[in-house]
């Protein structure tokens, strides 16, 4: 019988997971070339130097273009999958973004799809042959599902998560699982299992979290489309930090059965799955494919609403203008100069358009919203999180210590307390909608920052307010790239006096030289269940004013 001394340490468990990951990369064929001995801080171009021209061309083709080429037989699923496996392997070496690759599963599936097309002369589905990456807590049959806890290593899914089943049935090829932070609860991607994932635009910076493995991989064109999750900004923070598109849908539109998280069962603040992609077309492709499968027929927790992209959700009912409310600042943390500049440049171009109306939108009770969120993210005072750390003896990483232990206002609530703060949540949702309807009834969407600064230095992402407010309200929100940090125009205002502790932290940690090359992104928000509207509004804005103004991924 095993004794206490036989139990491996958390370090030994983590080392084995990392060894398994490295082995999965070593099984990729042809083998991935060694990296140069000296690397720049901006590593976006490294894969372009190591792969063949055809592999670069394939992997830098959008998801929506790839499915067309695959359907037409111009590319085979095997060739495309091999190219993405190789680029993902390089991305891991550059940014530590991969939990594990799945080369055998992926190539077997690709061959099956190629054989099907050859035999039947048609595709197996709308995603035929498209490689898709997933955040590691989205379950895969027979694979570990740790949700970022060392003590959960060895917990395996019996079958694929429902969303994975849908994508595979539509013809997708699953080939990569991406890194996530400890317990999934940080706007960066650091755990004691895999360590820190870094940003390929500047490896001193964070790729965001908790879907930061996805964003780092996609910024290096190691994936054309991937699944993230979002309970406080965990799709939108990574998209913002890495210059991608990321949609947080309304909760209960995308199935979550088969995903792991220590808070599943706690419904005070709900999370959702959603897509990240280097292109806006990839977002639409994901939503259309998943909802075309009518996942609500087997999961009645889901809204029974298809992806309504064939009808217009803007300029409808005789409305001649798209009305955009601009929230420049949430009143708690002032955005850094590049964020404000991106807003200004976007608004200047929008104001020229005759069928767009730009109005001001003032933040509504942001301080009260943050107080509700602080209580409802950890209504047990962080005890469940600490208990899961204790399973292996692993320590807190800095940001989860802040989020779930040290943030002012965290407290263990009794049952009456949970009821009370949940009631405040519902009252806030009601009053915010009344404010929208009474102050700006014609407003279609809100344009605002996604984070107060560009991609921050590692271990400094403490403020969730620009994203988590929309989780509290359960409003769909999409992040999109605009420009990049320009040291000549984005200098810090050293005369600024911060408003509070959060503002002081953000101001102190903004450094235009250290954050050079970071993408600058913004966020567009619509009312609950207006997911199609927020995507259509962004499509219209992007086309009309030429977003992004700077291609951050070039």
Image (spheres, helix red, strand yellow):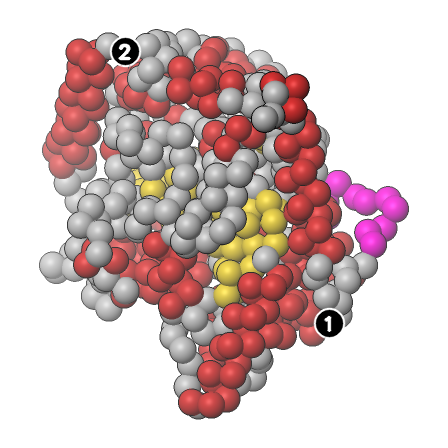
Q: Is residue 57 above or below residue 267?
A: below
The reply to whether residue 50 is visible in this rendering is: yes
**Residue labelled with disc 2:** 413
Q: Earlier in the sequence, mark 1 or mark 2?
A: 1
Q: For residue 53, which numbered disc appears in the image?
A: 1
Q: Which residues are magenta?
A: 34-43
Crowd class of label 1 (few under 14; some 14 to 19; many from 20; radius 10 Å): few
Residue drawn 42% across the image and 50% down it: 158
Residue drawn 61% across the image and 54% down it: 101
Residue drawn 68% across the image and 30% down it: 12
SS label for mark 2:
loop
Q: Residue 37: say if magenta.
A: yes
Discs 1, 2 touching: Cβ within 8 Å:
no
Along the viewing direction, whichever of 458 and 33 lies nearer the viewer: 33
**Viewer-side label of 1, 2:** 2
Q: Is residue 244 above or below residue 17?
A: below
Task: Left or right? Give the position of 403 relative to 535.
Answer: right
């Amino acid at each position: 019988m095993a004794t206490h001394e036989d139990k491996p340490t958390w370090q030994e468990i983590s080392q084995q997971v990392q060894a398994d990951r490295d082995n999965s990369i070593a099984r990729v064929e042809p083998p991935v070339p060694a990296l140069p001995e000296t690397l720049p801080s901006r590593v976006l171009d490294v894969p372009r130097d190591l792969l063949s021209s055809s592999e670069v061309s394939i992997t830098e083709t959008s998801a929506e273009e790839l499915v067309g080429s695959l359907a037409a037989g111009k590319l085979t699923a095997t060739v495309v999958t091999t190219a993405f496996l190789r680029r993902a392997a390089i991305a891991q070496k550059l940014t530590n973004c991969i939990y594990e690759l799945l080369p055998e599963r992926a190539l077997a599936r690709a061959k099956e799809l190629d054989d099907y097309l050859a035999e039947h002369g048609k595709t197996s589905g709308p995603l035929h042959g498209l490689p898709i990456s997933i955040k590691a807590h989205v379950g895969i049959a027979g694979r570990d599902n740790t949700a970022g806890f060392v003590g959960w290593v060895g917990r395996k899914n019996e079958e694929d998560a429902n969303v994975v089943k849908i994508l595979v049935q539509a013809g997708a090829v699953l080939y990569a699982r991406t890194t996530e932070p400890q317990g999934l609860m940080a706007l960066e991607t650091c755990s004691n299992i895999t360590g820190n994932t870094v940003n390929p635009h500047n490896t001193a910076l964070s790729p965001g979290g908790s879907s930061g493995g996805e964003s780092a991989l996609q910024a290096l064109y190691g994936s054309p489309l991937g699944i993230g999750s979002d309970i406080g900004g965990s799709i939108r923070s990574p998209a913002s930090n890495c210059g991608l598109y990321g949609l947080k849908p309304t909760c209960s539109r995308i199935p979550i059965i088969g995903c792991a998280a220590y808070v599943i069962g706690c419904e005070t603040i709900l999370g959702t799955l959603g897509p990240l992609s280097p292109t806006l077309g990839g977002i639409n492709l994901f939503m259309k494919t998943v909802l075309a499968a009518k996942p609500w027929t087997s999961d009645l927790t889901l809204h029974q609403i298809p992806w309504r992209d064939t009808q217009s959700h803007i300029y409808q009912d005789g409305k001649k203008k798209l009305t955009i409310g601009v929230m420049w600042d949430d009143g708690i943390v002032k955005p850094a100069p590049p964020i404000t500049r991106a807003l200004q440049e976007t608004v200047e171009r929008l104001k020229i358009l005759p069928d767009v109306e730009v109005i001001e939108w003032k933040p509504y009770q942001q301080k009260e919203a943050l107080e509700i969120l602080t209580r409802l993210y950890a209504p047990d005072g962080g005890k469940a999180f600490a208990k899961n750390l204790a399973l292996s003896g692993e320590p807190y990483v800095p940001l989860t210590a802040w989020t779930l232990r040290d943030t002012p206002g965290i407290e263990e609530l009794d049952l009456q307390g949970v009821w009370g703060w949940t009631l405040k949540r519902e009252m806030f949702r009601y009053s915010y909608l009344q404010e929208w309807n009474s102050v700006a009834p014609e407003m279609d969407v809100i344009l605002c920052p996604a984070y107060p600064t560009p991609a921050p230095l590692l271990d400094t992402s403490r403020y969730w307010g620009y994203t988590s407010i929309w989780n509290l309200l359960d409003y769909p929100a999409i992040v999109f790239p605009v420009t990049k940090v320009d040291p000549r125009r984005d200098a810090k205002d050293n005369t600024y006096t911060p408003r509070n502790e959060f503002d002081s932290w953000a101001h102190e940690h903004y450094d235009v030289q250290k954050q050079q090359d970071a993408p600058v992104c913004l966020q567009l928000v619509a009312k609950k269940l207006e997911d199609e509207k927020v995507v259509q509004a962004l499509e219209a804005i992007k086309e009309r004013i030429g977003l992004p103004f700077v291609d951050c991924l070039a």
